[in-house]
Image: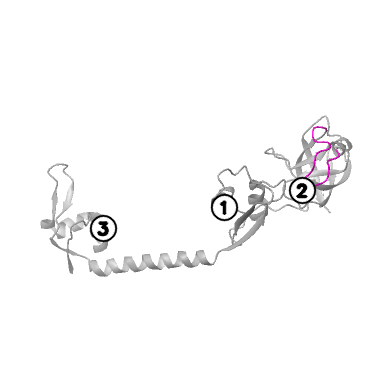
């Protein structure tokens, strides 16, 4: 059985853990090394007392320190192996859309990595660094080739204004807005209630209301009998 001389500043928790004994076992083995504070009544250990334990204090302490160094090296190595990419923000991009659909990470992580104080405010041309998750981490939702989506529409209040692709919005054209699909993507939209089908092109970014997946032009909404309904489900197939 090994011994250890308690040093000033040692704590009960540190000494008992390093010796590999419980507090009750420590008191039984070393009754002369413990006492109780006259002020608080709490147990204390006496500096200078030589105590016995199940193992060598120094060897256990060195083992703990060695394990801590290994953990630190492992963390540093993992950090050095991380992969990053740089992305230039485009008109219509949102941090939420980029994090969720493009990079499979979180808004908080991108904001933290780029010192972005307001996640709702990013500007076209701004460059951001994004850590590429490992395959095991990458759980970002994938956009299916054919899926049911929630659609709304936008009309005259945006008619004649620039879109994300730099062209002027025509509310009667077969165009749609989507958060993440590449501009120029062609899709086929079907109203499941009426069977009406329209083909369209992604030209703009949106919608920016939770629960909605795509914004239709007024012209498409009219062809799909969705003007009065305002918001509804459609089948979207990427062509």
Q: Confirm whether the magenta stretch covers residue 166.
A: yes
The tag on residue 114 is 1
**How many tags in the picture?**
3
User: What residue did someone put label 2 on?
Assistant: 147
User: What residue did someone put label 3 on?
Assistant: 14
36 with respect to 56 (left or right) = left
> Percent from the top left, x then y, of residue 77?
48, 68
Q: Is residue 45 visible?
A: yes
Query: Badge 2, how many Cα within 10 Å: few under 14, some, many 20+?
Result: few
Q: How is the image coloured?
A: one colour
> Percent from the top left, x then y, of residue 181?
75, 51
In this rendering, which labeled residue sits more in front, label 2 or label 1? 1
Pointers 2 and 1 in contact (C-beta within 8 Å) = no
Residue 55 or residue 160, whichever sits in front: 160
Q: Is residue 139 visible?
A: no
Residue 16 lies in quadrant: bottom left
> Percent from the top left, x then y, of residue 20?
26, 62
What residue is at 34 percent from the left and 69 percent from the top?
Answer: 66
In this rendering, which labeled residue sits more in front, label 2 or label 3? 3
Magenta region? 156-170
Distance between mark 2 and mark 3 Cα atoms: 58 Å
Q: Earlier in the sequence, mark 2 or mark 1?
A: 1
Q: Earlier in the sequence, mark 2 or mark 3?
A: 3
């Amino acid at each position: 059985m090994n011994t250890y001389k308690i040093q000033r500043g040692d704590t009960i928790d540190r000494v008992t853990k390093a010796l590999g004994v419980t507090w009750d076992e420590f008191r039984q083995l070393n009754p002369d090394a413990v006492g109780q504070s006259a002020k608080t009544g709490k147990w204390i250990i006496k500096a200078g007392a030589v105590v016995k334990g199940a193992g060598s204090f120094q060897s256990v302490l060195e083992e703990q320190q060695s394990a801590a160094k290994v953990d630190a090296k492992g963390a540093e190595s993992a950090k050095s192996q991380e992969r990053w990419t740089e992305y230039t923000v485009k008109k219509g991009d949102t941090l939420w859309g980029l994090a969720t659909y493009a990079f499979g990470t979180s808004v908080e992580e991108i904001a933290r990595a780029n010192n972005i104080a307001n996640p709702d405010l990013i500007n076209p041309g701004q460059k951001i660094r994004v850590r590429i998750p490992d395959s095991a981490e990458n759980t970002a939702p994938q956009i299916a080739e054919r899926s049911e989506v929630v659609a709304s529409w936008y009309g005259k209040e945006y008619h004649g204004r620039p879109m994300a692709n730099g062209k002027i919005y025509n509310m009667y054209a077969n165009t749609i807005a989507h958060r993440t699909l590449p501009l120029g993507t062609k899709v086929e939209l079907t109203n499941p209630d009426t069977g009406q089908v329209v083909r369209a092109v992604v030209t703009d970014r949106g919608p920016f209301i939770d629960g909605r997946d795509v914004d239709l032009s007024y012209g498409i909404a009219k062809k799909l009998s969705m003007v009065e309904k305002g918001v509804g489900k459609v089948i979207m197939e990427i062509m």
